[in-house]
Image: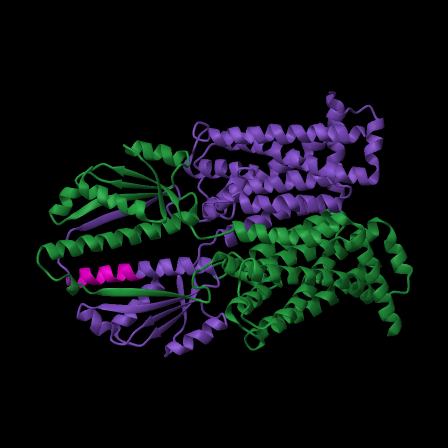
Amino acid sequence: MKWSRVRLLVWKELLQLRRDRMLLPLVFIQPVLMLLMFGYVVGSDVSNIPTALVDQDRTSLSREFARAFENTGYFDIKAHPAEETAVRPLMDANSIEMAIMIPPGFQAGMERGEQVPVQIIVDGVDSKTASVASGYASRVIADFTQRRIELTGLMPKTAGIDARVRVLFNPSLRSVNAMIPSLVAYILMLASMALMAQAVVRERERGTLEQMFVTPITRGEYLFGKLTPYVILSVAQIAAVMAVGVLWFRVPFNGSVLVIGAGMALFMFTTLGQGLIISTLARNRHQAQQLAMFLLIPTIVLSGFIFPIESMPRAIVPLTYLIPLRYAVIVLRSNFMKGSDFVALWPEFAAMAAFAIAIFGFAVARFQKRLSD
Amino acid sequence: MRAAFRRIDAIARKEFIHIRRDPRMLIAVLVMPVAQLLLFAYAISFDVSDVPTVLLDADMTAASREYLASYERSDFFDVVGRVDSPAEIDDVFDRSEARIAVWVAPGFARALERGEDGKVSVLIDGSEPNSAQLGQTYALALNQQLDREIAVEWVRAKGQDPEAMGGIGANVRTWYNPERRSADFLVPGLMVVIIMIVTIQQTAVTLVKERDQGTFEQVVVSPIRRSELMVGKVLPWMAIAFVDIIAITLIAITLFGIPLRGDVFTLGVGALFFVLGCLSIGLMISARASSAEVANLTGLMVGFLPGFMLSGFAFPLNSIPRFLQVISYLFPGRYMVTITRSVFLKGASIDVLWPQVAALALYATVGLALATVLYARRAR
């Protein structure tokens, strides 16, 4: 392998990237857009649930109860209908997603020490909001009861359980803290797989591939020269994403750059390999794009990157082990949040190494064969 | 007028031939949407259960065993093992073998006998916030329930009446989707996302391809008007999108058992404007893109990001920042997700959904006009 030739090829490829007046800006706008979307949309925690409050008691206690809901910040009380029957049309028109109904005699019953039934209605159309909303509501009610019992001294001190629930590693439970680290791997995949496949197919489309091979450049040099610009590009994107994540979204970083770097390097071989395989299968850039989509969608769904693997049906879970991104996401998240090292993460590293060898090896073999045809 | 129709017909026919000639394209537009639907609908769920849990019993009494047994009985916690020291909990979390650890402190049973609170710690790995949040809620609820049971027993043992302890009984009801099936919630939204991805992706490259293959000049010198060309380009994709919509609806009803409670007419009208809106986005991209790569990448980005993220199909939009709220109204996905969900699950019809349908109609009109103008400028 002659380095001067490789350097020329890399230079040519970078020139070509720069010549397209929209492509390079796009390559950098895309990760920023993705960061914003993932950081703010996927990483947002359910709050401001539009809620209707039907207060049929209208006493100071019922108002206090309603305020307990509002004070959490999870519920945004938008309507105060007088009757229970008014709730249905509101929910039909999608103006509310939850309703709290306080029955008449709420305060009186509480003062007599009775169990007072409070009705909570959630809109099951959005099942995520529904389960989170009813969870929040149960907690507000339990806290309210507890405080009330302590305040009035109605109940003598009894035996019980003092449970301290503590969340480790991500105590504020911010979803962004889990989202941004995994986004690093996803963006890497997009750039190195989709873009590189397009670049190789373009040469075939335009017939410049044949020209390339009448020059003294060897196959290995060509491959190396073709991959390097996209590796550089990916590294730049990763650095940008991590910087924005840590500085703007304030994602705490407890890990080590070495572990992340090693993990991403292994992962990059699997994505570059996938890109190469696509480039040997596709005849034009549009097909390359379709094939990239074909790989991307199952990857997004099954990697646990957005949708938790724990929630998947048991029959689906074994499929997730076939997705290299799954391991990269675990490495990134564990290292970012828990500072897990090579020892703790060795199964993931082993899996990624196996995928890297298998996919990249297959890709290179296929690429060589395709070119000699 | 007759001539205009003939020219539109010719362009549409030409597009159809392009599509038919390319079997990979046909797979991409007809098979892929269905495959995506199945994948998404089966794999995505936000119902968390069986969270791996380890137990640490430092008390080793009948009371602590009984307390911990309630975690084993729960569907939410999946007890995968027991550990002997707090250091082991760290190890287990580090290796991601468990996400929750319950730790009963020594002296638990003695505290209960004395009428005090037995001390328990529940540790949750927050690196997967979705299950951590639910874990927190479930752990608190379980402990509150056990606390109450123990308290009632204690009061009764002292010969007092436990009924005198007042409280609030929360009665939670879920409307429209009482079992909170994820599929009921996801599939109507998925239809929107899939159609958006397919249509934008495919139309984003049509005009660029025309230019790349040198047929662009031929079209320009032909007597066809820009608007006619646009309509001709749009028609075949309309047909394909509707085939996809009908296929997805049938699968939703038969395979996933999702009720179609509302008005099919409203759904159809909404879908018509929605598809037109998506196609106009694709054509705008195509009119502006400098190369096929740019068209592909932008199509992927626009079809995917706003469609997937800002349509409300999986991620609730109430809590996102205002500027993203504004952006979400600029893409047709958000309106259509409301329409499909309301029609499928809430049995809604045009009298409730007219604002969304009107927004989509406006979107389609403005979008197509804009695409034509952009394209005309490009041609010059």
Name the spot of residue B339 as percent of width and height, x first: 57, 68
Residue at 59% across / 54% down in the picture?
B37
Chain A: drawing colour: purple
Q: How is this picture coloured?
A: by chain
Q: Give the extent of the magenta segment.
A: A141-153
Answer with the quarter of the image where residue A20 lies: top right
Q: Quadrant of the C terminus of chain B?
A: bottom right
**Residue found at the far front of this picture:** B254
Q: Is residue B167 left or right of residue A294?
A: left
Name the spot of residue B299 as percent of width and height, x first: 68, 52
Image position of B140 with respect to B3: above or below: above
Q: Residue B7, can we see it?
A: yes
In front here: A242 or A1?
A: A1
In front here: B267 or A325?
A: B267
Image position of B38 with respect to B375: above or below: above
Q: Say which chain is green.
A: B
